[in-house]
Amino acid sequence: MKKAFRPDVDAPEWKGGHAPYDIIKEGSIAIAVVLILTIALAILFGSPDDPSVTIKTWSNATPVDFAQTALSELNGTSGTAQYGAPYNNASEGQKLGPLALAKWAGARNPVNTVQDFVIDPLKALPDQPALTQGLQEWNTASSSTRSGWVTNYTNAATKMKYANGQVVVPTTNSGPVSLFITDLTQMARTGALDQALVTQHGFYTTDFTKPLLFLSDGSYLANKAAKDHLLGEQWGMMNETGSYPGQAWLWLYSGWYQVAPFNTSANADVQVWGLMMLLSVILLFLPLIPGLRSIPRKVKVYRIIWREHYRDL
Amino acid sequence: MSTTEIDRQWTTRLRRRAAGKLPPEKLLPDTQPAYVSSWIYVFGVTTMAALMVVILTGCVLAIEGPQWWHLSSIGHFVNSLHLWSVEIFFFAMVVHLWGKFFMASWRGGRTLTWMTGVVTFLASIATAFTGYASQSNFDSQWITTQAKDGINATGAGAFFNVLNLGQMLMWHIVLLPLVAVLLTGAHVLLVRVKGVVPPFADDKELVQ
């Protein structure tokens, strides 16, 4: 028995006429037109290239913000310190319903903010007897003693200021913590911390995970991004600096973050990703989904596309 | 060697199968059905042309290395060419996708053609993203530190670290372009094998 014709699945056999078609000429013209258009746009608009932010520029521009961020790495309150996977196990991370996907993948890129962002870089500073003694004091102290020093310093750091070329916090009984923050800030202001954070794996490196995490824990990078209309509520990373189109094709992904329930959800990232994955799968399998595959036939935009064909019938 | 033995060879079988599915007149046609006469058909070939310019300009950037475009005015201009060819590529591809949707171009055994097109679109988005992540300037710093949260939340961040410049650059200039180009090739070959989808037969006069 012959199967019934399904208009959204089957195509009629074309028994009409054919017209001459020079595929090579068409391709050549297309390449020429795109090349000319590309060159014209590049000449007219160029491309953005704002220099990268360094820890040196950050700590010189806003030394207190840097020092407070360094303290947050030490007392475990920074975004990275509390992040969870893939950097550490400090939190469970976002969940998609009952699924803790990030936690299951584990801390494959381990970052210990105390050691990696404060103690190890300070160890790299040569000829600093007081600092060397402070690091020894830190290493030999019990964890409760360390915790007490850090807490005392953190409590006093609400009055932190930068004066006469150094961080000033009126505190007592903070052990070597005051020295750590002062020296780390000085190290950052010379540019040495930028180097120390990227060279933890040796001379050659292409991995900027640690300096980028440290930078993003402070407010300098975000403040600059806000001025350049790059924050999440400003449609975030689909934009780029200047008046360039950026990744306009991410409009739907960025758009979800602007609306409820995602704009207030603590699990927004994984929810938006989950939704986009679902939509992508639907788009992929659209020819097989009854109802959705009928939309083109019902909205009849094809009548405009093939208007000459239907007119000639 | 007997003829039968030659007939059984994998090479012979593959050649015959390929030639049967895609004879020269289908691969490089000199005519097309009369209904293929709309501006919408321009966007498929425009996408292909833009992809070629993207790859060409990307190759020039690759020859000189990732820092060149920050330090040289010629390098910056080549980067601008790369950026704008990418913008044209995506514009043409999105219009092409919408056009093919409204034509229900999966009809007549063309489901795989549609699917390779969709996967190419998704692979292209990933390729472009890794390009933005590899710029080594403020944009890449901000984009990666923002994007990491979404990717980490899915668990993929444990394996695909957007803050690792070396990893992003390798994905951008080796792995993802390879995927995008192979998929584009498969997509175009499927279009050649199956031909361009005919109009809906909602008029009895259509099938003559």
Image (tube, rainbow, N blue to C red):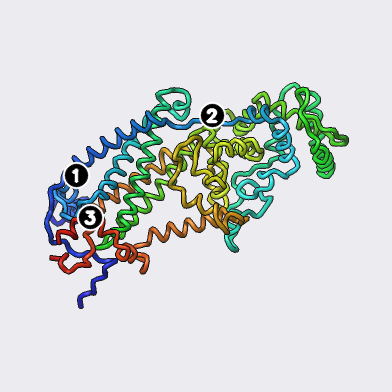
Q: Which residue is mark 2?
A: A51
Residue B90 seen? yes
Give the CA separation, mark 3 to mark 1.
13 Å
Badge 1 and badge 2 in a common chain: yes
Report the disc number at residue A23.
1
Report the disc number at residue A9.
none
Q: Chain of mark 2?
A: A
Residue occupying the far top of the picture: A127
Residue A122 seen? no
> Which residue occupies 63% across, 36% down?
A215
Q: Are marks 1 and 2 in contact (CB under 8 Å)?
A: no
Residue A167 spot, x, y in % from top left: 77, 29
Badge 3 and badge 2 in a common chain: no
> Which residue occupies 73% across, 32% down?
A64
Give the CA separation, mark 3 to mark 2.
47 Å
Q: Which residue is mark 3?
A: B196
In the structure shown, which secondary structural element does the residue marked by tag 3 occupy?
loop
Circle 3: residue type: Val
Front residue of this view, candidates A177 and A41: A41
